[in-house]
Image: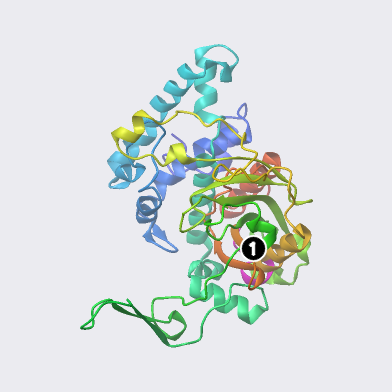
Amino acid sequence: AICAAGGKYSRLCSALPHLTPQERLCIYSLALHLRLFGDGHYRSGTFQNDLAKNLRNVALPATGVPLSVFCSCRPLALLFAWLLLPLAALVAAVRRPSSGGGSLGGAFASSLLSDWSWFHYWRLNCVLASYHALATSDPGYGLEDKQLFLAACERQGVAASPSLSDRAIVVKHRNEEGGLGLHTFRNAAHGGDWILQPALSNAPSIAKLLPPVAPLSTLRLVTASRASLHQRPAEASSLDEGGVEVLSACFRAGRAGASTDHSCVMFDVDVATGDIRRGTTSAHWYQLGLARARRCPLFSEGHTVEVHPDCGAPVCGEVIPDMASIASLVREAHRKLMPGVPLVGWDVAITAEAGVCLLEANLSCNFFRASFDERVYFAFAEALLGRLEGKAGRC
């Protein structure tokens, strides 16, 4: 009731002191999704539009129904939040009752509030970014635009993927005639809609982990900026790298024949050493339609993959080269480009042509199932809500 009435997070903490920060954030995140539903959004017009775009290919496992269906109007969003989501948690509790210590009630409470999947973390990151952008109008959110991001990297001397300076390029099919098969792409750097870039390939240290026809396979590092907790975060651009912390890293090993590494196995990476740990997937969350839903597992097996499934190349136990420099690059980028944005997911490529470079920044970011210190993460989320809602510090 506190959340539905637009109450602050601190009131929820006072009303439910027996809950853990994770459990309180689960409740408040869901309430914020409903509260912000019709509000403006930094990249999609409204928060509702952003939900619909990002959830159109995501379904609760074994349902086959895209979650964007429940974003079409507020009544459906309410139905999902207050009825269907608890029902899904109950089904999960029945299928895996041990998660609550043996009792169905305990399993249900755990499934609903504390057994978080990658989806919970992603949605909390998304709603925190939306809430923060709406409250602060921080200019860093403008760099979600990929062209503005590349231009900012060039100005600040941050290593990013190279792009072409041509005003436009023409692409022709080799066997079409009469003007058919011809396409012109105007460069975004000159007022067009397209970023024109040379294709990059995996460096040998990465290619050896992949099948021969794998896409460019990147690292995803997530950073948190303490400057976002300040009233004047722009002044924190002079902070040393200690103001930005790398929370997590994963290696997305692209699948054979895929055009991008969105089709991948996600291997956890030790931020400090670059050691690659076991991998997993979230493919069971992307099975749309009844036919696929019937074959879809309800739960992930967790991090069990040690070799690339398409070629048998060992991945677990290998090392990402010069991980310290990669971590330094993303800390520098966050500090220089968008110190006031709380969380950023960086796509980092290790390439044969351009070395280590940033591809883009994702401000409503996904951890991609990498491990991280949840205590630090939840404390940061609470501190951010305190900053936005006028209460210093945590609950």
Position of residue 72 in the picture relative to residue 321 (left or right): left
Assign the C terminus to one quadrant of the image. top right
Provide residue 384's location: percent of width, then percent of height.
61, 51
Mark 1: secondary structure: loop
Q: Which residue is mark 1?
A: 231
Q: Is residue 179 above or below residue 108?
A: below
Provide residue 335's location: percent of width, then percent of height.
69, 67
**Residue 368 seen in render:** yes
Provide residue 122's location: percent of width, then percent of height.
52, 46
Q: Is residue 160 above or below residue 81?
A: below
Judge whether residue 275 is colored magenta: no
Q: Nearer the viewer, residue 175 or 233?
A: 175
| Range shown magenta | 335-342
Provide residue 381's location: percent of width, then percent of height.
61, 47
Q: Could you say which quadrant of the image residue 309 lies in?
A: top right
Q: Nearer the viewer, residue 62 or 14?
A: 62
**Residue 394 seen in render:** no
Q: Amino acid at mark 1?
A: Gln
Position of residue 320 in the picture relative to residue 8 (left or right): right
Which residue is at the far left?
A: 178
Q: Nearer the viewer, residue 389 or 311?
A: 311
Position of residue 300 in the picture relative to residue 355 (left or right): left
Q: Nearer the viewer, residue 165 or 239?
A: 165
